[in-house]
Each structure stands twice: as C-alpha cells, then as structure tokens.
Amino acid sequence: MPKHKPEGKYRVAMAGRSVMRQWFKYWNYPRALSRYAVHFPWPIPWKEYARDEYYFQYVQIVQPRADGPGEAYGQEALAALRRQVSGERFDALFFKLCYIDFQDKRIRDEGTLRELFGRMRTLLEKVHAFAGEQGVPLIAGNALPVLAPAEHAQRLRREYNAWLAEYAAKHRDTAVFDQFGLLTDSGGGLRRELARGPFDNHLNDRAYEILDESLLLMLSGLRQKVRNGVTGPVPTADASASTAPAASPGTP
C-alpha cells in the first residue's frame, strides 16, 4: 500500500483480478500500450490512480478455488483482502469476482451450480462483514458478461446478480455496481464491440469508458449522502445510470 495518499480525496480500495488490474492500466498507461497490458508486465506505475476528488488503490485478490473444500472457498481471497486493506484509511471498498469465477468447467449440472452459488454468496457476505469492520460501505460488482456464455455458467451469473441486488436492498451499507447491465447485449452476452478480441472476454478501452462514467456517478452520489449526513441505502449504479451510448449488438 502506498505510504503517501493524496489528502482530501475520497479513497476507494478496488479489489479484483485481471479485469480490475486492466482497469488501472487503462487509467495509467499510454493508450498505445494499454491494449497489451492485461497479459504483459510493463515498468510503469499503475496500482494507484487519482482523478478529480477520488483516489483509487488496486487490491489484488486470489482466485477462489472452486475445487477445494466448501468451507475453504474464498479464504485466500479474503486473507489477501485483509492484508492489503486492514488498517488503511479508505472511504469505500469495491469488490468483484472475475469472469473466470463463473466459467468453472465443473458447472455442468444443477448440483454443482447450487454448490458454487452458495459458496459465492458466503464469500460476499464475509467481504461485507469485513467492510463493516473497516467502517466503510461496500460496492459489489456483479458478474461480468462473456462473449459466448455456456448455459449453466450463465444461469449462475444471473442467479448471483439477482441475489446480489436483493442482498444490497436489505443492507444500507452495500450497493451493486451493475457491470453486467452496462456491458451486456440483448442476448445476455458481452457486447462484441466492448471485448478486447473476438475470443477474449477481457474488456477494451471503450468498455472501461462506460464503467468509468457509471462508477464516478455512483461515487458522487455516495459522497453527497455522506456530506449531507443522509441515512439510507447507498446509491446503486446500473445500466440506466450511464449516459454512454449503448451500441446495438455487433456494432463495430
């Protein structure tokens, strides 16, 4: 974690893996390099980003092991979160699972789907409890869409997203960042013009522009509530909150 954080800015810990990592590289890298940054290391500082009133810090979590015992699912991810966030002065925690978590090759039957769905819910509840320990609201990103969603994996995404929306509605300190709604096409897949490549589910710069706009709107609403001392649920970002043009599927 950085030793010197900009004073007076709203600080957000951004926890994730490849998609989150690329978001920071989109922020920090020259555009000529950013398209390659998801796969290759570059000697350019990128784990922090300050913009306007906001300061963002990348927090790398470990992929939950779906093949381990049920009680162990997500323990390493939660431990990584604790190591990097505990004791630091943040104003909000953003946490998201990555698309690979919903692409597990074992998701081929109803029993496996139910098992993994339960583990994901438990992990999110633990992350929420951790945010409460830190005294900050939780912004939970829902499942990301992919280019060619398989049947059971897509059901898992939709069920997780529906559960997450209900969970946030019941907890005043939790909000959903609806990246699925922002990036999906009418068929439920990732809009092809937002993918890094024809067979790569990672996001391109256009997708991150859309996410940026919605995230800043959400944080602005959250900060305003804090300034005004208003109680109640934190603002939720969804596809309707973005003014970015939604191209039709297949638009280049």
Image (cartoon, rainbow, N blue to C red):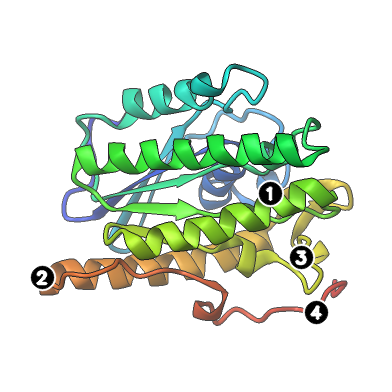
Q: At 44% from the left edge and 52% from the top edge, which residue is drawn?
A: 140
Residue 15 showing in the rendered view: no
Q: Position of residue 151 (x, y in %)?
A: 83, 51
In the image, which is nearer the foreground, mark 1 or mark 2? 1
In the image, taking residue 48 as reference, residue 148 lies left or right, namely right
Q: Say whether disc 3 or disc 2 marks the residue closer to the N-terminus.
A: 3
> Callout 1, which amino acid?
Leu
Q: CA distance from mark 1 to mark 2?
A: 37 Å
Provide the residue designation for mark 1: 156
Q: Which is nearer the N-term, disc 1 or disc 4?
A: 1
Label 2: element kind: loop
Q: Nearer the viewer, residue 85 or 101?
A: 101
Spot occupied by residue 120 in the image (x, y as percentages of width and height)? 54, 39
Residue tagged 2: 229
Viewer can see residue 171? yes
What is the CA distance from the residue labelled 4 to the residue labelled 2?
Answer: 41 Å
Which type of secondary structure does the marked residue at label 4 adopt? loop
Tally the numbered discs: 4
Q: CA distance from mark 3 to mark 2?
A: 38 Å
Q: Which mark is residue 188?
A: 3
| In the displayed structure image, the side of residue 127 where residue 76 appears, left or right | right
Which element carries disc 1, helix, strand or loop? helix
Disc number lying in front (3 or 2): 3
Going 40% across and 72% down the picture, which residue do you hit? 217
